[in-house]
């Protein structure tokens, strides 16, 4: 390896801008490099993503290695090991914002933002089709005085045909437990997570404010999400909505229904299931208990853990806006994850995030794996509903 | 709203088409617009005018008549040899102020869009971009433009009845070119304009035409997925027969069967062909995003449950390897009979 001998140019104006945009969050970093060692890119690339150098750049005011800034999947693995508690993901997003201002973004990302603007979803899908998946389900419009929860499906579960089956499973589970719930139908606002993660903070503030106004108007209380991504932004990145607002990921809500004996899973499912914690649940929001409560309740299922689980979970590669960027074959974290699931001899790799499903299924296809299936926990719970509940006429 | 430079009451019953030149010949979209303009104006008794700009291009006027122009307004000037949006908008403004057309149509090409936007602002009129159809309300003299919005979820009919000229841009391939009438005559209007060197702000130093493909412009897209087992040669053969381009889903690109720039979908290219033929593609959502705006989607897959069939207009449950040679045989026979 040759050492780059060029002097580093430090730009004072850029330095000030960097400090302002990242809110000085990189300042406590003392360059130990644990972040670089923890980053999953090191598992797939000979040359790891040097998180440490990027933090140094953010401290000093130089902005090199622009490709690296777009690699971060916001998995947060570096943050849990950082001895100085630097909010590294936020710093990356700040650097991305700077690249937006300089119009140096990878191809295709502007389309994602424009789609949120025009279509109220990042997927370039028509807003009028948002509830297309729910045809025949007769979902009720949310009324805070009548409903226990607002069921927030989010863009991916509304449009991605694979994730739609998760949305339908959740509806069936809620009905089996006799939960009164409402939805916002076509008026459901995009949470803006893609915009936040891609680093366009000013536009994210707009999107969040728009959604906040809607939630305030309907006097939202408990809001249950399908995706951990929506859950995380509502919980950690939104302005204050009202005192009763409480975002919950569906795994926590369903686990509560099981523990409160409102939902009973009595259909047998004799499979070896391993659970892939989505980063935003298992690590970032420390929610490792509830998904396992559901899986362990499934009669005849055996739950086995992979080496990297709970807060130490391995990212699927789809977070941090990476769903909208191409990852070359051989560099996909999900390939490693599928191998891990095969190594523990699982029949099913369960997860609770539509983006994880997408990445994991993609790897199963490209690796030619046939003996392992990817299922969302909601789909597994749906399979484990007793015969009586299964015959509920919800899908007619 | 501010008034346009001339009022609808002052406008002539004329429909103008910007004639874009591409390598010494008219761009396809200009011929398509002349043909459509002919149909619209014919019914209403209007005049169709082609606006021809360039250096030493008067020979092209006859071709414009043959496709339906009654008049060609020619601005022939040494400084107009290359498209420069400053120079072109400068002289087009002068022509429009004299000719006062009711309607002005341009192709939604990079240059056409560039020119249309600037002119609409200067003329203080409206511009309907990327129209999918045009209707002329003869009684009111109003052009109604159809545009799709929200990812194709709605169709809007737009008019700008109070402003002139009524401007629209139309993408190549939306309208069909009429057969040329070789003996059709027209009138040449030679426009003298004020144009000096300082009005042109850019010079073409060198012209590079990339080798790269542009799938977004292909009228026919032939896509292959995992199910064609890397046999893209046969897809190329089919594509050559229907003047199409070959695209692919992510797996064959990953496996190196075809170059990354032909990947269609969320992290690849988003296309709007007239026809998309999909061979051996299951139809993951991330791919569907890339073809959902195609006018007609045809899918061939062995699995009747494949999600692609939910998006296809025509569904064929069969092995792609069986269909392809037969399809090629039929197309080849048809081509030969046309040329025979």
Image (cartoon, helix red, strand yellow):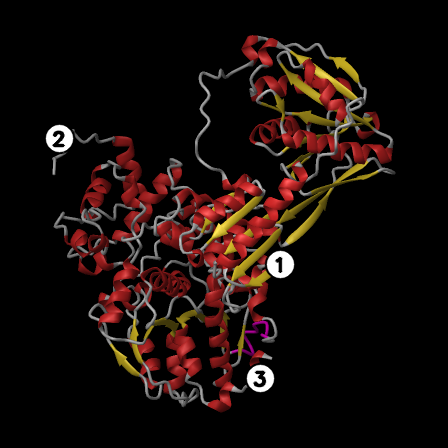
Task: Return the x and y of residue B223 as percentages of the image width and height.
Answer: 49, 50
Question: Does the image show residue B70?
Answer: yes
The numbered dot on residue A5 is 2
Q: Please report the bounds of the magenta region as a residue range.
A: A139-147
Q: Quadrant of residue A59?
A: top left
Q: Is residue A106 above or below residue B96?
A: below
In front: mark 1 or mark 3?
A: 1
On screen, residue B262 versus residue A9, left or right, reads right
Q: Main secondary structure of the magenta part?
A: loop
* Element class at badge 1: loop
Quarter location, residue B314: bottom right
On the image, numbered disc 3 is attached to which residue? A393
Say few, some or many: other residues with alpha carbon within 10 Å of mark 2 (under 14 / 14 to 19 / 20 or more): few
Relative to residue B256, is residue B2 depicted above or below? above
Label 3 in the same subunit as label 2: yes
- Report the disc number at residue B313: 1
Q: Tell me the subunit letter for badge 2.
A: A
Mark 1 Cα within 10 Å, few/some/many (few <14, many 20+)?
Answer: few
Please report the residue visible at 25 percent of the width from the left and 37 percent of the height from the top: A64
Element class at badge 3: helix
């Amino acid at each position: 390896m040759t050492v780059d001998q060029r002097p580093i140019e430090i730009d004072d104006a850029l330095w000030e801008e960097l400090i302002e945009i990242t809110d000085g969050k990189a300042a406590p970093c003392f360059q130990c490099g644990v972040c670089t060692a923890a980053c999953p890119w090191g598992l797939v690339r000979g040359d790891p993503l040097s998180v440490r150098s990027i933090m140094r750049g953010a401290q000093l005011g130089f902005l090199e290695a622009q490709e690296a800034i777009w690699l971060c999947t916001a998995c947060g693995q570096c943050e849990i090991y950082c001895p100085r508690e630097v909010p590294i993901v936020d710093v990356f997003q700040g650097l991305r914002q700077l690249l937006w201002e300089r119009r140096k973004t990878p191809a295709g990302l502007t389309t994602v933002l424009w789609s949120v603007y025009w279509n109220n979803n990042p997927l370039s899908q028509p807003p009028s089709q948002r509830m297309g998946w729910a045809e025949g389900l007769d979902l009720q419009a949310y009324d805070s005085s009548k409903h226990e929860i607002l069921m927030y499906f989010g863009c991916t579960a509304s449009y991605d045909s694979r994730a739609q089956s998760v949305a339908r499973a959740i509806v069936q589970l809620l009905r089996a437990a006799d939960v009164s719930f409402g939805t916002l139908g076509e008026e459901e606002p995009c949470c803006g997570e893609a915009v936040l993660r891609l680093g366009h903070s000013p536009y994210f503030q707009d999107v969040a404010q728009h959604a906040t106004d809607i939630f305030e108007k309907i006097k939202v209380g408990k809001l249950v999400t399908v995706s951990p991504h929506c859950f995380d932004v509502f919980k950690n990145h939104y302005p204050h909505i009202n005192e009763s607002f409480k975002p919950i990921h569906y795994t926590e809500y369903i686990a509560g229904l099981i523990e409160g004996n409102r939902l009973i899973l009595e259909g047998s499912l004799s499979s070896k299931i391993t659970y892939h914690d989505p980063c935003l649940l298992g690590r970032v929001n420390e929610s490792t208990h509830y998904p396992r409560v559901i899986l362990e309740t499934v009669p005849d299922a055996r739950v086995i853990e992979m080496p990297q689980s709970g807060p130490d979970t391995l990212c699927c590669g789809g977070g941090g806006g990476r769903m909208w960027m191409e990852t070359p074959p051989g560099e996909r974290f999900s390939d490693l994850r599928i191998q891990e699931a095969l190594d523990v001899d699982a029949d099913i790799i369960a997860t609770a995030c539509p983006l994880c499903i997408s990445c994991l299924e993609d790897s199963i296809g490209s690796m030619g794996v046939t003996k392992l299936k990817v299922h969302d926990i909601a789909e597994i719970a749906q399979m484990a509903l007793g015969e009586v509940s299964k015959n509920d006429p919800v899908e007619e | 709203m501010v008034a346009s430079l001339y009022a609808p009451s002052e406008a002539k019953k004329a429909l103008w088409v910007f004639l874009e030149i591409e390598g010494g010949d008219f761009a396809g979209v200009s011929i398509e617009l002349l043909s459509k303009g002919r149909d619209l104006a014919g019914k209403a008794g209007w005049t169709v005018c082609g606006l021809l700009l360039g250096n030493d291009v008067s020979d092209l006027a006859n071709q414009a008549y043959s496709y339906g122009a009654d008049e060609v307004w020619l601005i022939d000037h040494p400084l107009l040899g290359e498209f420069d949006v400053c120079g072109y908008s400068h002289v087009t403004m002068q022509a429009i102020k004299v000719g006062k057309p009711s309607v002005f149509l341009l192709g939604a090409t990079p240059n056409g869009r560039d020119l249309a936007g600037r002119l609409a602002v200067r003329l203080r009129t409206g511009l309907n971009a990327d129209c999918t159809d045009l209707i002329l309300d003869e009684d009111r003299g109003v052009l109604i433009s159809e545009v799709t919005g929200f990812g194709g979820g709605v169709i809007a009919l737009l008019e700008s009845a109070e402003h002139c000229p009524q401007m629209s841009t139309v993408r190549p391939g939306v309208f069909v070119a009429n057969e040329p009438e070789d003996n059709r005559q027209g009138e040449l209007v030679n426009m003298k304009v004020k144009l000096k060197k300082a009005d042109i702000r850019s010079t073409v130093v060198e012209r590079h035409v990339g080798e790269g493909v542009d799938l977004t412009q292909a009228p026919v897209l032939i896509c292959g997925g995992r199910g064609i087992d890397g046999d893209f040669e046969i897809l190329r053969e089919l594509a050559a027969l229907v003047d199409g381009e070959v695209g692919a889903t992510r797996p064959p690109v990953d496996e190196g069967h075809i170059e990354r720039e032909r990947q269609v979908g969320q992290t690849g290219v988003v296309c709007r062909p007239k026809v998309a033929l999909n061979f051996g593609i299951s139809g993951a959502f991330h791919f569907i995003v890339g073809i959902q705006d195609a006018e007609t989607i045809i899918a061939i897959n062995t699995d009747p449950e494949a999600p692609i069939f939910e998006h296809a207009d025509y569904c064929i449950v069969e092995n792609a390897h069986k269909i392809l040679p037969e399809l090629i045989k039929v197309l080849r026979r048809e081509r030969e009979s046309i040329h025979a």
